[in-house]
Image (cartoon, helix red, strand yellow):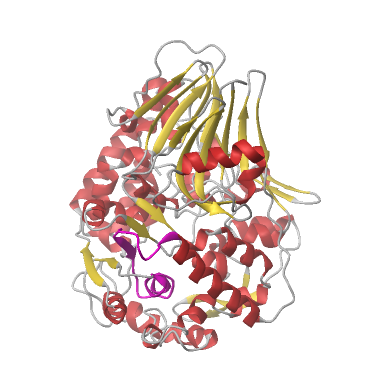
Amino acid sequence: MGEFVGVYDNELDGEFKCEYPFFDDSEFESIQLPNFRLLYRTNQDTVDKCFESNDYKVVVFGNIYGHLKDTQFDYQFLSDSPAKYVHDLYNVYGEDCIRDLNGEFILIVYGINQDTLEIFTDRLGTRPVFYTESTQGVLFSTNPQVFPFFDTEIKYNREYLTEFLSCRRVLGNRSPLEGVYKVPPGSLLSNTPDEVSTRSYWDPKYNPEDKPFKYFQNRFNRVIESLFDERFPSDDNIEIGYLLSGGSDSRLIGSALPDDGIAFHMNEWFNTEAKVAKDVANILDHEFVFLERDRNHFYDLLTEHNSIFRYNGFFQGCSSLGFSPDITSRCDVLISGMYSDIFLKGYHLPKYSVRFPIVGNIPLPIYESLRDEDDLVQYITSKSFLDSETAVPEYVTDDIALGDIVKDNLDISESITCHGVEYDSAELLSFFNYPLTNDYGEPYFVMDNYITKTNPFLDYRIIDLQLEMPLEYHLTKDLVNGYLKTKRGVSEIRHATSGIPVKYPSLLHWLSWFPNVFLKELIKYPRPPESHMTNIQWTNHTELIRNSEEFETLLHDAIKKADRLNFIDSERMTSIYEDHMNGEDRTHELYSFIQLFSMPATDEIIRNHGELI
């Protein structure tokens, strides 16, 4: 994808420059027009992401895969210019062409004659674009950290900074920076000499169809086969890599590839998960590359790449970024199977649960309806939605509750508006992926700065299927495993989480989950070489903190920055660390703290104001 920062105003004067660390780079290209300036850099793509005619200048960030309805313009992902393709469509249909433009993208369309600027997000807002109105004009960027470097008046917003520190992200179109917003999903930011506005061009509706599961399975199988054939023609001379775990989603990618692929697996040691992944790669006859994380892997990410974070997720979600040289030197395109569980397996849907000794509450595959505002607030602040037990960190001095923040940003009338984004129903809100940045896994996209990255589960045909499949199937069926059953060999290999082959029914996987997790994670069999290592693909960060001198250094540096600032009790942070070292689990508070004080925007706000809020 790359990154960009720009400005639109009637009275721009002089060359547009940016002092933010990430943009202070000679590799950036520049567009300098009378009322529109843009600094941008794409990744290693060879295709042209910028196209200009007498009427329009079009810049594309991200991936375009084609148009779902129009076929008059031939287009090939990875080889044709997406900017020219969008320009040709736009020239014929205007902005109506964007609705069915399949991809993960941000589009910038500058009307040369009309002096208008339109910035489009894709249906899910997979690539966030932020904006603010300042004395310099309308500033916009893929990275909100740049804004305090342009507008010295910007500080943090009390509520949204609390939400970020508590939940690893801010919902909807909000951000922790005062007056800085995201363009909503499926929308455009329109700039004219007279006004600045946003409006929606696509509003999802959840309309489940009363059809047998076999209908959805067959439809899913056809979409997967089609999209892999479309994106990766067998005669393309490209090297394709994919991130392979021991689960099903990444296994589908390897199975659907028309040609050879390179399977990358990240882990601390060659554990159960890594062995399953290698078995899959061997069956597919794909090269298997084991990327071994050392003890400082995550903390090096924080110090070396702190300028790219966008307040969606913490640094530990960027694991692949630490291996970018290894990955980019071996392949041209990287495929990820992330988000399948959210889109197709009801991962964040509210469910009834039952409590078991030792492991706590286990969700049941039964949907729990959200009836009123209290239910919505409780759900949005629950583990089902946040994916972890979180609360406002104790080092935050303000007396503010997470539930109050959600309630202040929730409006229920004929529809539900949460943090500036409108939802047709509670079911649509609980699908969690509208916008996709509701999920704190957004660091997944930072690799886009270094390589073309694509995800089959973000294809619009998959989104349409999700919105038509009954909740019962989301919760009790598995389309991915159903597809894998058509691929002999890989379906016979066990799933790393359940411990049984993926060919078996979903209910059997659910029943097998408890004893397998108990064996691997609670009694630690087989025994990992070090305490922060696990038998799955994820690191035990609670133990990693206790074993790392580098973390202690990062924490002490952050405490020095936080000393005597408003909103933060740095002395309490010291005692939180001591409690953690003495056996408590304070991982979330420790990581949120060093994340905040590693960010260049925080340093700039402190320089400008001597405070955060």
Give whichever of 37, 498 is nearer the camera.
37
Rendering coords of residue 380 (x, y %): 61, 56
Q: Position of residue 557 (x, y in %)?
A: 26, 38
Image position of 518 with respect to 406: above or below = below
Q: Is residue 570 magenta?
A: no
Residue visible at 52% across and 88% down in the picture: 505
Question: Which quarter of the rendered picture does the N terminus lie within?
Answer: top left
Residue 174 seen by the camera: no
Q: Residue at x 34, y 23 (%)?
A: 19
Residue 243 belongs to the span the image colors magenta: yes
Which residue appears at 54% of the width and 24% of the height? 54
Q: How many marks?
A: 0
Q: Is residue 271 above or below residue 304?
A: below
Residue at the far right: name it: 414
- 18 and 104: which is toward the camera: 104
Give the x, y percent position of residue 604.
37, 26
Q: Is residue 305 visible?
A: yes
Please give the range of residues in magenta: 231-257
Q: Of residues 388 and 254, which is closer to you in this image?
A: 254
Q: Is residue 149 left or right of residue 99?
A: left
603 left or right of 348?
left
Up/down of 183 relative to 191, above or below: below
Q: Position of residue 13 (x, y in %)?
A: 46, 10
- Name the one closer to the observer, 31 or 337: 31
* Vertical order, 500 against 350 (above or below): below
